[in-house]
Image: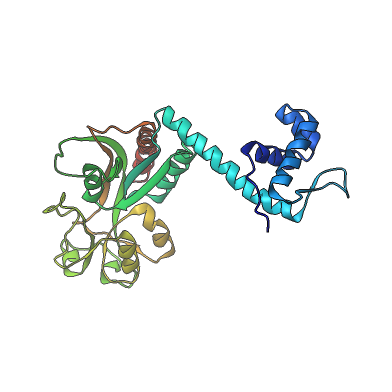
Amino acid sequence: MQNPGMPTLDQLKVFLTVVDVGSFAGAARKLGRATSVISYSIANLEAQLGVSLFDRDTTKKPQLTTEGRTVLAEARIVSNGINGLRAKVRAMLEGVEPEIYVALDVMLPASRVTDALKAFSEAFPSVTLHLHVEALGAVTQMVLNRAAVIGVSGPLDIEVDGLERIGAGFVHLIPVAAPSHPLAKAGKKLPGAGREHVQLVLTDRSTLTQGFQLGVVGARTWRLADLGSKHMLLKEGMGWGNMPEPMVREDIRTGRLVHLDMPDCKGGPYRLQAVHRTDVPPGPAGRFLIAHFENQAEDDDMTYSNRW
């Protein structure tokens, strides 16, 4: 059995152009070559591969054979790979990072994350993104440890040397519980009511917030490292706790959760800040993401001031 030869990138380009424009003459015009040169390139490609790519006998327009359709799929993969390679090299020559590691606070609303990443994907299609989602001080810890170039972190009540901080708005935290929970009964609660029930608290994987109790008033707590697990347990009536308002807005609307009226635990703004090391400033891709989160913050401030 004869092995197929090695087609050239130019032959694949001609083949794809013929398919895209629907004729040899159209491909010749698009590529600025003679029609005979296009025909010769396709003939050489068929000879290299040992298969007929077009059915030239039953129609004036070149129609792909079964083998041609198979080759077409692989040719597009090769072409896209080459285009991607060239885009990455061009970006590196322009100073754009080939890849970027980003850490985001779990409290950051999903709408803000997807908005930023869609814009990033359009602006830097060649940059590979590595995304980590952490809680509290763990975002800053990843930046300090160089595991992430930039982060969007929650508030830290301590000064951290070698770190640049840029305000990125806030998300409003509110206390919630399931309708079946005792704290969800109608009426304003007395101060200290929350201490009598299990409070679900998000814990920090880092040591940066060790000793700090952000929004903790319960004498009995369950510590959870994952906000999704906390959300699930809250809806099952396993305790009460503070949650980012955008994440539970629909639950409150449909009655799966109740916004608690507690005088000693009103919730409030959870300040967000973009962070990066001062000795390793981000490149164009990292700066784009930071600027985007900054711009989002202005919209957040207006939205929440009107709502709250």
Q: Quadrant of residue 218?
A: bottom left
Question: Please, which colouring scheme is shown?
Answer: rainbow
Direction from residue 46 to residue 208 in the image, left or right: left
The residue sitting at 16% across, 50% down in the picture is 209
User: Residue 70 versus residue 257: which sits nearer the camera?
Assistant: 70
Residue at far front of view: 1
User: Residue 193 versus residue 167: which sits nearer the camera?
Assistant: 167
- The vertical placement of 109 against 305, above or below, is below
Q: How many marks?
A: 0
- The vertical placement of 276 against 47, above or below, is above
The image position of residue 190, as x and y in percent, is 18, 63
The image position of residue 277, as x and y in percent, is 23, 36
Direction from residue 211 to residue 180 in the image, left or right: right
Q: Quadrant of residue 230?
A: bottom left
The residue sitting at 47% across, 30% down in the picture is 90
The image position of residue 83, as x and y in percent, is 55, 38
- The vertical placement of 220 against 171, above or below, is below
**Residue 177 appears in the rendering:** no
| The N terminus - image quarter | bottom right
